[in-house]
Image (cartoon, rainbow, N blue to C red):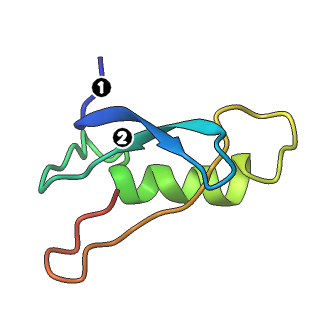
Amino acid sequence: MCTFPNEIVTCRLPDGHRRRVFIKYQAGQSHDCFGHRGNVPYETEVYRRVLHPLADFRPKYLGTHTDPNSGNVS
């Protein structure tokens, strides 16, 4: 179970290979539970700063998108 909407998307790359990508959406939701649970923006920073530099960590952090209109993160 997840607090936020998510999905696994299969992408076909130009060379024909496929890559599965896990995507989590903020979707206007928040889950700040007494200050000890982060939201999607917090989680993406943990992946980017802490886990991404670890060569063997899975899943790999590929990036973050912030919607310019709503400010939602995915």
Residue 40 is left or right of residue 18, and the answer is left
Residue 63 in picture, x, y percent from top left: 55, 61
Q: Residue at x 39, y 67 (%)?
A: 65
Could you tell me the amino acid type at mark 2? Arg
Confirm or deny contact between disc 2 and disc 1 (CB under 8 A). no
User: Which mark is on residue 2?
Assistant: 1
Q: Earlier in the sequence, mark 2 or mark 1?
A: 1
Residue 11 in picture, x, y percent from top left: 49, 43
Could you tell me the amino acid type at mark 1? Cys
Give the crowd class for mark 1: few <14, some 14-19, many >=20 residues within 10 Å: few
Residue 12 in picture, x, y percent from top left: 53, 44
Determine which quarter of the picture holds residue 70: bottom left
Q: Residue at x 36, y 40 (%)?
A: 37
Q: For mark 1, give the secondary structure.
A: loop
Give the crowd class for mark 2: few <14, some 14-19, many >=20 residues within 10 Å: few
Residue corresponding to mark 2: 37
Determine which quarter of the picture holds residue 2: top left
Residue 14 is left or right of residue 42, and the answer is right
Residue 8 in picture, x, y percent from top left: 40, 31
Above or below, 1 against 45 in this view is above
Above or below, 30 against 64 in this view is above
Of the 4 image quadrants, the one containing the N terminus is: top left
Q: Distance from label 2 to label 1 (Cα)?
A: 12 Å
Determine which quarter of the picture holds residue 17: top right
Q: Residue at x 71, y 46 (%)?
A: 51
Q: For mark 2, give the secondary structure.
A: loop
- The single residue placed furthest to the bottom in the displayed view is 68
How many numbered marks are there?
2
